[in-house]
Image: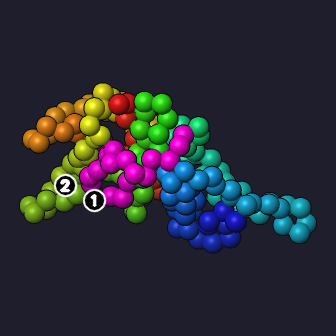
Amino acid sequence: MLPGAGRSRQAHRGAPRNLLKIVSRGGSYLTGVGPDAEGRMSSSVRERLEEFGTWMQACGEGIYGTRGASEVLGVDGGGIEWLHTRTGSALCAFALLQDGPLQHGESSRADGDAAPVTLTLAAGATSARLLGAEELKIHAGADGNSMVAPAGSPTEHAVGLAVEL
């Protein structure tokens, strides 16, 4: 059953999380959703499917037609768990978010102000963009690695980043 069906809204996070963990390791995902004994879809299941569909509209290109890339060290940073898929020359990295959309300044500094979330990209990255959103400006970090600082995320439970190599 789709995680979150018949449970709290908080449980919806399980669908993108489970999908990403499985696909990044080369697997396929089956939601296992069906009608009740009377042949109807409950409103809670319908709502969860709609939310999952919205997420897939924004991030689906990093899922459909890709292969697992869990062994790749493609994107890192923000104190967030990243999972990876590949298609052609593109690497897609997904962050599993704990508390809603990624916000610019999610990390806090000692002075109490927010510090931007900065991500290190895979070597050879030529472009990067948030799935379902805008192109990101790549800049060189102090160590020479390519870096991006997304201003936020278009999705709640997991954000996708496409990196061209």
Q: Is residue 38 above or below residue 114?
A: below
Find residue 20 and report its horizontal and vertical position in percent.
51, 54
| Residue 27 placement, left or right of 129 | right
The colouring scheme, among rainbow, by chain, secondary structure or one colour, is: rainbow
Residue named by callout 2: 114
Q: Which mark is residue 79?
A: 1
Among the 4 quarters of the image, the one containing residue 1:
bottom right
Q: Is residue 122 left or right of residue 57?
A: left
Amino acid on which the number 2 mark rests in the picture: Ala
Work out whether residue 94 can be spotted.
Answer: no
| Res 16 label | none
Please, what is the three-letter code of the amino acid marked with disc 1? Gly
Quick one: SS at disc 1? loop
Of the numbered discs 1 and 2, the one sitting upstream in the chain is 1
Look at 26% across and 52% down and name the residue there. Answer: 77
| CA separation in Å, label 1 and label 2 | 14 Å
Name the residue rendered at 30%, 27% in the picture. Answer: 126
> Measuring 13% from the left and 37% from the top, which residue is drawn there?
144
The C terminus: image quadrant: top left
Q: Residues within 10 Å of mark 2 (few under 14, many from 20)?
A: some
Q: Is residue 96 visible?
A: yes
Is residue 77 one of those drawn in magenta? yes
> Taken as a whole, is the magenta stretch helix, strand or loop?
loop
* Camera-side residue of 53 and 71: 71
Give coordinates of residue 79: x percent, y percent: 27, 59
**Quadrant of the rendered structure where residue 32 is?**
bottom right
Region of the chain picked out in magenta, as a range: 66-82
When the figure is inspected, residue 130 is found, relative to residue 51, above or below; the finding is above
